[in-house]
Amino acid sequence: MSLPASLHVLSSLAPLMTRSTVHVALLCALSLSTPLAMGARRAPATGRIEGQVLLSTALTNRRPRFRIYADPGPGARPPATAGTEMRNVVLYVQRAPVPDGAPAPHGSVPQRDEQFMPHVLPVFRGATVEFPNDDDVYHNVFSLSSAKQFDLGRYPKGQSKSVLFDKSGAVQVFCHIHSDMSAVVLVLDNPFFAIPMENGRYVIDGVPPGDYTVVGWHERIKPVTGTVHVVAGEAAKLDFNIPIPPPAEDARL
């Protein structure tokens, strides 16, 4: 068996070192090259959860919603489609241990064409979310939700304001000026969540081994749950059938 490179270097320097110094250096080199020391530097082994999401209710177009303000803009939400509603679904793992030093990355919900984009944004608790105004009109972003209350005031195109989301829960976001604008910031207790692709496929990576409940969330339904067993280095399969009702008609029309 060949010696580690560190031992070859030490052997070449041995004539210049005392016997006790050589012994100490050899012990240090051997300890760093053992499988135990190398394993201590490896990231913990994790698995993944993946599957398919099916939206089981046919969606209908939303009726136009007229503003009380005369600002220019589309004046109505776009028709709901299976693809766009799929992007409003969130799959998240309940009660998963949070890795040490897990970051809470920034998020962004631009206001564009007098809509919040995306309509649903899942974030890890402690994340800061920017609300940039990309429209030619003023916006005033606010929320009265128990998980986070804020009012960013009026600001024009090109400006952005941010909010720190430090408590878990669903935060409903609106615009004081345009009553048909809405979004949801879903603040979660761990970083193990995903939004399905338009074809319904989702993947949650880096999940520690164990038994978990996974939640399928959409703002218009009671959450759907499923259980899964995660094994390190393997993919656990879990599919969801989410029955989404058509959007409620505006009671004022």
Image (cartoon, rainbow, N blue to C red):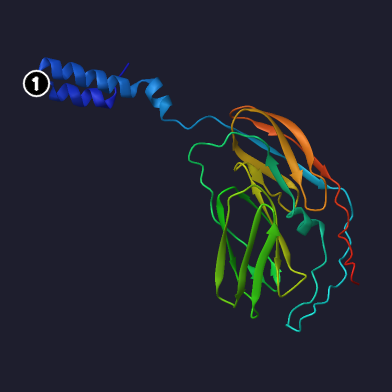
Q: Where does residue 251 sit, x and y in percent of width and height?
A: 90, 67
Judge whether residue 118 can be spotted in this image: no
Bin the neighbour count of mark 1 within 10 Å (Cα to Cα): few under 14, some 14-19, many 20 and up: few
**Amino acid type shown at disc 1:** Pro
On screen, 182 above or below 156? above
- The answer to whether residue 169 is left or right of residue 224 is left
Q: Which residue is mark 1?
A: 15
Q: Is residue 37 visible?
A: yes
Which residue is located at x 43 percent, y 25 percent? 39
Quadrant of the frame with the C terminus: bottom right
**Which residue is pictured at 49% across the width and 37% down the height?**
100
Q: Position of residue 247 (x, y in %)?
A: 86, 60
- Residue 89 against residue 180 in the figure, above or below: above
Q: Could you say which is closer to the camera, residue 32 or residue 199?
A: 32
Give the quadrant of residue 136: bottom right
- When the figure is inspected, residue 30 is found, relative to residue 216, above or below; the finding is above
Which residue is at the front of the view, 96 or 8?
A: 96
Q: Based on the displayed image, in which of its 4 quarters is residue 45 positioned?
A: top right
Name the quadrant of the N terminus.
top left
Query: What residue do we see at 89% from left, 61% from top?
Result: 60
Q: Is residue 173 left or right of residue 19?
A: right
Find numbered disc 1 in the image and state the secondary structure of the residue it sits on. Answer: helix
